[in-house]
């Protein structure tokens, strides 16, 4: 039974009480007191590069890792020990871009996973399958012992605690650890704790549809009177803070992949939002941390109150929250062969790739569209194009070269603890039995490429004011000595993101050709198996400025477009115009994902009237189906500049910005990424 829909006027409590436990834990996070858990130890591995060997090394690592419980913590689980010799321990391979099956782990618990593998060992005879199952038994037995060790530590701390309230809290932690070491979670509290232990033991990757598995525990505890809503909210916020503690949290120049997906649809297409959904949005807005990223899924059946709650968090500056449009995402997954019931169960990775959480693996390869266009321009030294249609045909032929020519391959997971938690692997006793293997083919910088092609069309073919030779020479010189041409290319030609068909339809043609080409060559079939999926997103954007000068009026060293967004600073007609440009492209063909970034000045969302306009903008995005993911930065450029100049000022330690598919503390970013965030058009009005 779903929680009744909240009244649309009901605002969530996103103000952090400075005297609360959560405030103290958050302050400890910024002070990095959790780093005290880091310990380097002489750990001797098995030396066996086998599934059993990987499991033995995992067990040795857990045995060497000491419990670490800080004051005020209710959710525990700290960093594992670091081997003195990194090569002495080999846990096997897995990719943290996809999550383990938390629903399976919650339903069985660590002991249940061990026992299931042990049971299958009684009947399985294939040597490779037996090695896998033995590795699973060793891994989950080690996990049980690790959890029990935390329980004993909490019990010992309670015995020496002078504050009776804290002593009781520690005894509760001990009891929950004992429960998880011997069975499965039976409460909201113990389910949260199991997720935390899975995070510690299973890697740094994304989490998945958190509210869907946590809601039954929450509802049962609330209905039975074991827990109040405020107690549940505090526990959830404790978990969120612990999530931000992991190695590489707030990593300056890359994605830590810690994503939760909430709301969306049930398998039969009903609204999946519930009370835990709203609790996650409230925690995101209250804590203002870079981790975990909170990704809210919307479709036509989602209550308006959830959109308002998400807008409230974003308006407050919680730039780790992203909006996902199921009306584009679900059809895009169906197109690559995912049955609709399972497509509705998607979650997302760190850079917004769509994944089947707990049911499959993903890998991806990125092609940057801008250097492909530059290659075309330089090729005109040896050939001429009579028409712009010939230019487009040549550009498309270059894109074909990066498209797949065979079915998507399966991906083995040789880390037994993680592999067992992927649906079908344990049942089939195989590390390669994951139901789906999604292989992404990603095209980045479409905005730059479309702008460059539009400039070529306008200046070389329509106006005949520019020759290929002059363009090549200008680009080779990085526009030195060609200032007037540089200014024309940059400021006098059509730019994607301004609701201008002249360039928008070029972006549409390129993007849809790429999607159709990947689909045509992928041999995707409906149901389980390897899939190829086209997508539009970016990685390492701060490193792409090294690309040479380009026909869109970009010099070497200048920034490139992020994801499916307009070129940096070129969207000058307002955010609604950006949405209109993007909506011209049929992106429900992009089954790996598509992302748009919009930056708004913080003043634009202040006041009731301004907030309503912001909600209206988000509503337009969802009704206009365009990209799958909208990432909004509510920022003040002046504040960012002050933060960059005063990085040690405590006032700026919690200044979170959206970078590409991840969020980070602005002052921790390297200069190139700070420049990219600062360079994005900061819209000061909602009108197109």
Image (tube, helix red, strand yellow):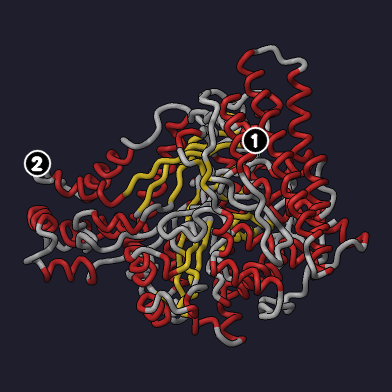
* Percent coordinates x, y for residue 23 in the rendering: 65, 74
Camera sees residue 657 = yes
610 left or right of 270 in image: left
* Percent coordinates x, y for residue 480 in the rendering: 9, 65
Secondary element type, mark 1: loop
Question: 461 above or below 339?
Answer: below
Q: Residue at x 63, y 59 (%)?
A: 242
Q: Nearer the viewer, mark 1 or mark 2?
A: 1
Q: Residue at x 66, y 45 (%)?
A: 198
Q: Residue at x 42, y 66 (%)?
A: 668
As rendered, which of 400 and 606 lies closer to the eye?
606
As rendered, which of 140 and 216 lies closer to the eye?
140
Secondary element type, mark 2: loop
As rendered, which of 387 and 469 lies closer to the eye?
469
Camera sees residue 308 = no
Residue 261 is labelled as none
User: In the figure, residue 5 lies in which quadrant?
Assistant: bottom right
Residue tagged by mark 1?
A: 422
Q: CA distance from mark 1 to mark 2?
A: 53 Å
Binning the other alpha carbons within 10 Å of mark 1 as few (below 14), some (14 to 19) or many (20 upward) gives many
Tell me the quarter of the image containing the N terminus.
bottom right
Q: Residue at x 11, y 42 (%)?
A: 383
Question: 185 above or below 245?
Answer: above
24 left or right of 257 in image: right
Question: 315 above or below 121?
Answer: below
Q: Residue furthest right?
A: 224
Residue 382 is labelled as 2
Q: How many numbered callouts?
A: 2
User: In the figure, residue 503 lies in which quadrant?
Assistant: bottom left
Tell me the quarter of the image containing the C terminus.
bottom left
* Percent coordinates x, y for residue 327 in the rendering: 60, 54
527 left or right of 439 in image: right
């Amino acid at each position: 039974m779903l929680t009744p829909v909240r009244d649309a006027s009901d605002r969530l409590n996103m103000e952090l009480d400075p005297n609360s436990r959560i405030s103290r834990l958050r302050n400890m996070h910024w002070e990095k007191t959790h780093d005290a858990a880091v310990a380097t130890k002489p750990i001797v591995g098995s030396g066996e590069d086998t599934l059993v060997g990987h499991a033995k090394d995992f067990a040795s690592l857990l045995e060497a890792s000491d419990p670490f419980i800080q004051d005020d913590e209710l959710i525990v689980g700290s960093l594992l020990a670091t081997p003195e010799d990194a090569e002495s321990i080999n846990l096997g391979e897995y990719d943290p871009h996809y999550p383990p099956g938390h629903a399976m782990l919650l339903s069985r618990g660590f002991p249940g996973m061990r026992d299931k593998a042990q049971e299958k060992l009684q009947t399985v005879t294939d040597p490779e399958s037996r090695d896998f199952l033995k590795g699973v038994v060793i891994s989950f037995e080690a996990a049980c012992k690790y959890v029990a060790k935390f329980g004993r530590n909490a019990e010992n701390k309670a015995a020496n605690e002078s504050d009776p309230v804290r002593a009781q809290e520690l005894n509760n932690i001990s009891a929950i650890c004992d429960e998880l070491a011997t069975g499965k979670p039976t409460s909201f509290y113990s389910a949260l704790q199991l997720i935390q232990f899975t995070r510690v033991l299973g890697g740094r990757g994304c989490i998945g549809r958190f509210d869907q598995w946590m809601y039954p525990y929450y509802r049962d505890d609330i209905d039975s009177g074991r827990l109040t809503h405020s107690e549940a909210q505090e526990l959830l916020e404790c978990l969120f803070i612990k999530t931000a503690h992991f190695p590489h949290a707030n990593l300056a120049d890359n994605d830590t992949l810690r994503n939760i997906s909430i709301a969306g649809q049930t398998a039969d297409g009903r609204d999946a939002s519930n009370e835990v959904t709203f609790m996650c949005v409230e925690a995101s807005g209250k804590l203002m941390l870079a981790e975990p990223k909170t990704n809210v899924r919307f479709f036509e059946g989602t209550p308006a109150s959830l959109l308002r709650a998400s807008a409230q968090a974003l308006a407050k500056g919680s730039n780790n929250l992203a909006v996902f449009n199921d009306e584009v995402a679900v059809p895009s997954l169906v197109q690559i062969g995912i049955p609709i019931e399972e497509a509705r169960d998607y979650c997302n990775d760190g850079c917004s790739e769509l994944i089947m959480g707990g049911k499959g693996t993903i890998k991806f390869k990125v092609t940057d569209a801008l250097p492909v266009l530059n290659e075309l321009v330089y090729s005109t030294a040896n050939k001429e194009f009579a028409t712009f249609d010939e230019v487009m045909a040549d550009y498309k032929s270059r894109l074909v070269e990066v498209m797949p020519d065979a079915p998507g391959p399966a991906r083995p997971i040789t880390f037994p603890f993680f592999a067992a938690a992927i649906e079908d692997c344990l049942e089939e006793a195989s590390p390669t039995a994951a139901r789906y293997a999604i292989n992404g083919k990603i095209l980045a910088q479409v905005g730059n490429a479309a702008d460059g092609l539009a400039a070529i069309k306008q200046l070389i073919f329509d106006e005949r004011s520019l020759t290929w030779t002059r363009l090549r020479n200008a680009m080779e010189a990085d526009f030195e000595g060609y200032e007037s041409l540089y200014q024309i290319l940059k400021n006098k030609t059509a730019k994607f993101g301004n609701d201008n068909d002249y360039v928008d339809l070029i972006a549409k043609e390129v993007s849809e050709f790429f999607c159709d080409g990947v689909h045509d060559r992928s041999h995707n079939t409906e149901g389980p198996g390897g899939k190829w999926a086209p997508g539009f997103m970016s990685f390492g954007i701060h490193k792409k400025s090294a690309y040479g000068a380009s026909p869109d009026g970009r010099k070497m060293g200048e920034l490139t477009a992020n994801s499916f967004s307009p070129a940096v600073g070129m969207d000058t007609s307002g955010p609604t115009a950006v949405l209109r440009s993007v909506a011209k492209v049929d992106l429900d063909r992009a089954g790996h994902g598509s992302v748009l970034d919009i930056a708004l000045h913080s003043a634009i969302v202040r006041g009731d009237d301004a907030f309503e306009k912001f909600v209206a903008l988000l509503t337009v995005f969802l009704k206009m189906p365009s990209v799958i993911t909208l990432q909004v930065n509510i920022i003040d450029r002046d504040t960012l500049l002050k933060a960059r100049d005063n990085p040690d000022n405590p006032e700026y330690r919690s200044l979170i910005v959206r970078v590409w598919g991840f969020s980070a503390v602005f002052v921790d970013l390297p200069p190139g990424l700070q420049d990219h965030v600062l360079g994005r058009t900061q819209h000061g009005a909602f009108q197109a």
